[in-house]
Image: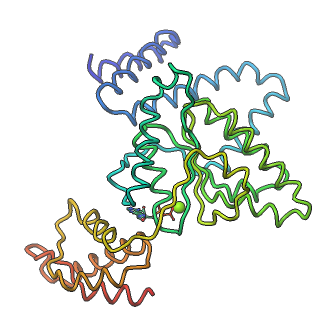
Amino acid sequence: MTQNTYIKEIVKYSLENDQENLLAALNQFIEYSRKSKRINFALQLQSILKEGLKHQQTKGLAKVGSQKFLLKEEERIIEELVIDKLTSDYTLENLISNNNVRDELQYFIKEHHSIHILKDFYLPASNKILFYGPSGCGKTLASYVVAGELEKLMYVINLGAVVSSKLGETSKNISTIFKKAATEDSIIFLDEFDSLGKLRDYNQDHGEMKRVVNTILQLFDYLPQETIVIAATNQVNMIDEALLRRFDFKLKLELPNKTQIRELIKLTLKNTPFIIDDKKRLTQIVGLLEGQSYYFAQKTLINAIKRTLFSLENKKDVNLNIDLGIWEEIIKASN
Ligand SMILES: Nc1ncnc2c1ncn2[C@@H]1O[C@H](COP(=O)(O)OP(=O)(O)O)[C@@H](O)[C@H]1O
Ligand SMILES: [Mg+2]
């Protein structure tokens, strides 16, 4: 069958209100998309399908007043606190890191690719990972890499918003999101994980903070194997010890050294027409960038490319050699 045949069937059954055949056709189409390597599309369809089925199931219950209220409440929490629900195309190639981080990440990904083997031997899969280190060094990127490599949906949660939205409701909000993600075997990405530490300041007796930490510890303990939690922070010392201990992997993403800055430049220029031919000057620039983040190095490079481009009069047959003088100026001006 071709894609068009599936679509025609789906339209036909939905217009005829033929629920049973519609579901069968949709499931076949998802399987077909998966086999034809359109994994993200298949995942998105599957998520729409699940969502739709859940709506139907709860419609019946909605007559009972309180139930209806609960449902709305759950939807509201998810809408407010989940920044994004996404699939990713990033792979390990996109992330520059030291060998240790690379090996550990590869290992984590492998565990999930081979989860059936672990299950056969009743071995638990690692499913909690913490990325820490200075800003702009790839914590968010690394989580996208995990989602991309494992072809899983990822819920991006702004923990800052969860914590500050309504004090006293933090535990409930976090549980709601975890439960939702767990039903879909997805990844929960808790950015700004150190925000939990702020609860300490809000509340003199630390009561709320203790409650929230306990909730998270419990949620961690009962997390299904296929659900993954990724947390990121640039203030690892703000995080409760007990919580830190529960992570299977704690990976430090550091500022790039000179070799890594060069790798980043190569990666950024890959598949573009832009080149750098003054090797001596490049060495100076790499020296200037030492001590800065990957983000800073990449951002200034891209700005230099744009300005080089604008400075060229005839853009048609240009030598797309990046003007390193411009780049140097930008770096110095942003420092
Ligand atoms: N280790 C890295 N390897 C490659 N690119 C990186 C790396 N770290 C940062 N970048 C670039 O900088 C951008 C911002 O990094 P990000 O992952 O948001 O950093 P963080 O979350 O640690 O603050 C990334 O999208 C990527 O373009
Ligand atoms: Mg980030």
Q: Residue at x 39, y 17 (%)?
A: 28
Q: Quadrant of residue 59?
A: top right
> Which image quadrant shows ligand 1?
bottom left
List x then y, in percent, for residue 206: 87, 59
| Rendered view: 67 above or below 14 | below
Q: Residue at x 31, y 24 (%)?
A: 35
| Picture quarter with the C terminus | bottom left
| Mark count | 0
| Rendered view: 82 above or below 160 | above
List x then y, in percent, for residue 207: 89, 54
Residue 224 visible? The answer is: yes
Q: Residue at x 37, y 15 (%)?
A: 9
List x then y, in percent, for residue 320: 15, 74
Q: Quadrant of residue 175?
A: top right
List x then y, in percent, for residue 216: 73, 44
| Rendered view: 285 above or below 96 | below
As drawn, is 61 to the left or to the right of 223? Answer: right
| Rendered view: 46 above or below 259 | above
| Picture quarter with the N terminus | top left
Residue 156 visible? The answer is: no
Q: Residue at x 75, y 45 (%)?
A: 173
